[in-house]
Image (cartoon, rainbow, N blue to C red):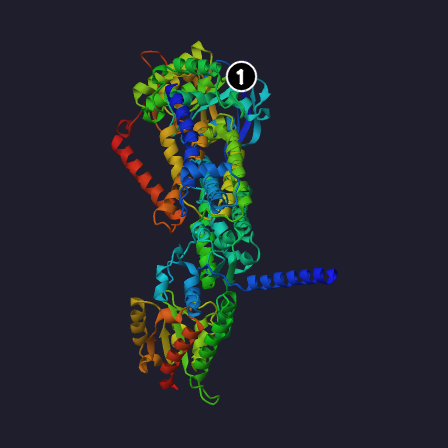
Amino acid sequence: MALLKIDGLSAGYGGRPVLKEVTFSVQAGGFLGVIGPNGSGKSTLIKAMTRFLPVSAGCIALNGRDLHALSLSDLSRQVAVVNQHTPTDLQLSVREYVLLGRLPYRNRWHLWENSQDGAIVDNAMALAGVGALAARRFSELSGGERQSVVIARALAQEPRVLFLDEPTTHLDIRHQVALLDLLRRLNREQGLTLVAVLHDLNLAAEYCDRLLLLHEGGIHSQGAPGEVLTYETLETVYKTIVLVGASPVSGKPVVYPVPEESRKG
Amino acid sequence: MRRRFSRNIGLIVLLVAIPPAVLGALSVGAAGIPLKQLLAQFVSGGGTVEHTILFRLRLPRSVLALAAGGALSLSGVLLQGLFRNPLVAPYTLGISGGAALGVALAIVTGLATALSLALPVAGFTGALLVVALIYGLNASRRIRDVQGMLLMGVMISFMASSLFMLVTALSRSEDLNGIIFWIMGSLDEPHLWLVYGLAVISVLGLGVSYLFVRELNAMALGEQDAHHLGVDVDRARTRLFLLASLLTGVTVSVTGVIGFVGLVVPHFIRMVFGGDHRYVLAASFMGGALFLLACDVIARLIIAPLELPIGVITGLVGGALFVTALVQKRRGI
Amino acid sequence: MKHINRWMIIACCGFCVGVAGLAAQQTPPQRIISLAPSLTESLANLGVAARIVGVTSFCSRPASVKQIEKVASAVDVNVEKALMLKPDLIVTTKLTDIKDVRKLQSLGLRVEIFEQPRNFDQLCAQFRRLGALTGQSTQADSLIGSARAAVAALSPVADSEARPKALIQIGADPLFVATQESLMNDMLKRAGGQNIAETWGNGLASRERVLALNPDAVFIVTMGVAGKQEQAVWESYPSFKAAQKKAVHVVDAYLFCSPTPAGFARATAILAEKLKPLR
């Protein structure tokens, strides 16, 4: 049962087309990883799917309904986005920041949150593992803590689908693993559908149940990690020599880079 | 929770400070009117000189200080929120430049002496033209980027100022005086209905700005996040810009150019109240009102019986306070 | 008999009221505020210095007015103070902020505004008006008369004679000169000179243009050190006629700027004296 259906999606920036006729679907409860070289359109895909960019062709359907037919507030109640960059200088406490995730549920006449909002926010923070940070100032958080807090805010929106645009870039391996573990837990335990742009192929292979490989604005291949991450595919798309093995821990594909000196022979 | 409690207290403190501040301002002036007599004047009607001074000179002046201070400060908050830039002030976008140009033209063409309302109307027209220009350029190009709009505003500001200087360079000396007076800003407005009109618009502006609290709080996260939280960023940007411009334009056409209020007061307020616009809007309004009132009292006292131009005081006091606060904050970290 | 008495009483009352009315009109203002140094000096010349209750901080002539209460600075009028002094007449020029003027008027005070005079005739007309306002018309007429006579007495230039060309500089950096908008233009003409800058708009001039026209004399009306510096600058130009003839003069700015008719006559006499050797 497809929660998200993307059909013939084309989008770009001011006349310059980036995505060309992209078609795929995301199952409810799935964890889709979007991978591809720089400039292949990964971020553009997220922006187009969340209506931050206008689409020049094609349609996006969420649960059978055209995404563009929804009002902005309806959209923000179904879909939440964790972006790459969050301003670090916000003069808010962590709890106040997470409370902003409840904005889609309040119209402009309701200035203050009610107790239900408070409960949902507390729950979101607990799920994201940042309950203890509630009183801290947002500007004082470390990178890893900040990303988790942003996820808490997205969770407070109670979305059906969570989009993440390179959430692990700039984080060290400890925080990368912690974040992805959190996402996997949310996916498995809460049934939250996830679409994440990841630039690290191994992390994508380890955590996502399906991968979407973009190449020059179109889909090159999609499927389970083992299907997509073959050395021929990667060499074609990334234009570099690689070896693909299996993780000794989970058996998931692992991509080994092949440095210049090892290529002889 | 504790923070919310103390912020509410902060708001109440600001509100409660206004009446005594006004009384204080009313008791300052060349004619020494002791406090008891002041209160008595309110009760009695009167044909006395004291009564005239109180009700025709000092009271309108204080009301104008509160109204203008509030409007400018509020405008600063709205613009800083919409541009996500703490250095943006009501005059950055050239609204005061346009108003100054309008006034200069009105004085040089002799309109100002012919019609008594020529100055405020010309000022407002000039400001309105600048706003229309920025709005039109923005709308037609559909710039997604808010920085583009800011840059355009700054450029228009420079152009308006240059045109203004051109007009003054070609003007006669007696006209020059009038233009300079206006530029320096003043809280002495002979038409009382303009004063009370501005007060009404100012307070209404505060009310309307509260309809945009969601947008302001969301836009602090950046345009993308604001969009994903359900805010129509383009529409919000336009409306906030228009509201802020209206407040600024009306204020400038009545008082002339009084700088720093819209830049400095929101900063202080944010340092104390945090970034939540539900508090920042009202606190900045009241803070700006009190600030300008205090500056006016200083302007009238410091070299009494002569008065300093109000713009000089807001600049010096505002700047000094700001620098001290910034330095202390740095030390704290 | 009774009729006649009644009508006579009414007629007498009417007459008395009429006289009283006339008398009231003729009582000149006793508490005057002057918002311009030139007007203060003029009032003193008219002999009503004792009636002045308020002046600006820049009113300095004659010396006695410095004691009077200050109600205004160069840029601002303290309306409150003015009101407190209960003036029955306020005189000012176009240089005062119009907002302050309106404020004073809205409080029911009588404000008489004097335009900047552009020539001697306008200056005398204003002086006469001031005289009428203060009930000193005779005094005014007499002073105007002697000023006119003094000006007329300066040896007139015959039509056949060429008038020396001159320039009156009133500002440096940027260079500002007196044009037909300024009273000093008329001074120069009545002194027998020809103002090369007469038609130069508001007076913002270029040195180049001045050098090109090569006047016979330059009169510098700036104050203090700037005057001496400007003199040195003009004298440094090699082919400059005024420099060669040693006709670059610094004159007393206080006298030349916003004078009274008597002052105008004195200033014009100084110009005439300096121009004579150049004819």
Image position of B310 with respect to B285: above or below: below
Query: Picture coordinates of residue C70 (x, y %)?
Result: 38, 56
User: Between C45 and A193, which is closer to the camera in this rendering?
Assistant: C45
Looking at the rendering, which quadrant does residue A141 occupy? top left
Image position of B137 with respect to A55: above or below: below
- Residue drawn 44% across the image and 33% down it: B19
Residue with the mark numbered 1: A3
User: Between B5 and B25, which is closer to the camera in this rendering?
Assistant: B25
Extreme-bottom residue of the structure: C160
Using the rendered image of the protein, determine whether residue B173 is visible from the camera's viewpoint.
yes
User: Between C136 and B130, which is closer to the camera in this rendering?
Assistant: C136
Query: Picture coordinates of residue A107 (x, y %)?
Result: 54, 24
Say left or right for C138 vs A128: right
Q: Chain of mark 1?
A: A
Q: Which quadrant is home to the C terminus of chain B?
A: top left
User: Between B38 and B75, which is closer to the camera in this rendering?
Assistant: B38
Q: Which quadrant is home to the N terminus of chain B?
A: top left
- Residue drawn 43% across the image and 22% down it: A196
Looking at the rendering, which quadrant does residue A261 occupy? top left
Query: Picture coordinates of residue C187 (x, y %)?
Result: 44, 76
Badge 1 local density, few (<14 within 10 Å), some, or many (20+)?
some
Using the rendered image of the protein, determine whether residue C118 is visible from the camera's viewpoint.
no
Extreme-front residue of the structure: C1
Query: Picture coordinates of residue C234 (x, y %)?
Result: 32, 74
Task: Give the structural element (helix, strand or loop) at label 1.
Answer: strand
What is the three-letter code of the residue carrying label 1?
Leu
